[in-house]
Amino acid sequence: MGYAETLRPKLLLGTFTPTPGRSFSEVVQNIIQQAKDDGFLIGGELGAALATSYLHPQSATLHIEDNYRAIATKLKLKPSPQGEIIFLKQFGHQNFGNDFLLNPLADPLLIHAELLIENNDRRRETAERLFSKYIDERQKNA
């Protein structure tokens, strides 16, 4: 709750949607490739889908260090208050998930927190899978 109510609003850079004529599913591969090229991290539903292969993503949260407008331009996104692509500023230096070698994914704990923001059964179930696969063991070893 602290993440959703306190930290996340301070990190919000903007919400975007694909330019007209393009759907979210059409930009997913571009997001993944651009994340690898530009060094930003993928979270939210898209991050959870890549980590668990369980969820069909309808949105993404992108954790950006630098110029988010340049990334939005490269991805051909436009600002939208109801956009399905959320840009957040990275905080600190440990936002990445160590276990995610093939994809530039945010830390599983951040992805988990993003999934729990909305009350949605499918997202909650995916968050539980993510917790079991990546977070629970780390918590036991802490």
Image (cartoon, helix red, strand yellow):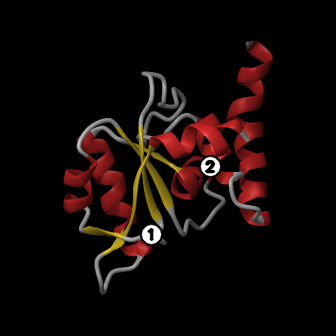
Asked if the residue under mark 1 is in contact with the one under mark 2, i.e. CB atoms within 8 Å, the reply is no
Residue located farthest toward the top when viewing the structure as drawn:
142
Instruction: Say left or right for 4 vs 141.
Output: left
- Label 1 belongs to which residue? 81
Tell me the quarter of the picture where residue 125 sits: bottom right
Q: Residue at x 75, y 14 (%)?
A: 141
- As measured in the structure, the alpha-carbon distance from the residue carrying label 2 to the one carrying label 1 is 18 Å
Where is residue 46? Give x, y as percent. Answer: 52, 57
Indicate the amino acid at tag 2: Glu
Indicate the amino acid at tag 1: Pro
Image quarter where the C terminus lies is top right
Camera-nearest label, 2 or 1: 1
- Label 2 belongs to which residue? 114
Q: Residue at x 80, y 18 (%)?
A: 140
Upstream in the sequence, badge 2 or badge 1?
1
The answer to whether residue 20 is above or below residue 6 is: below
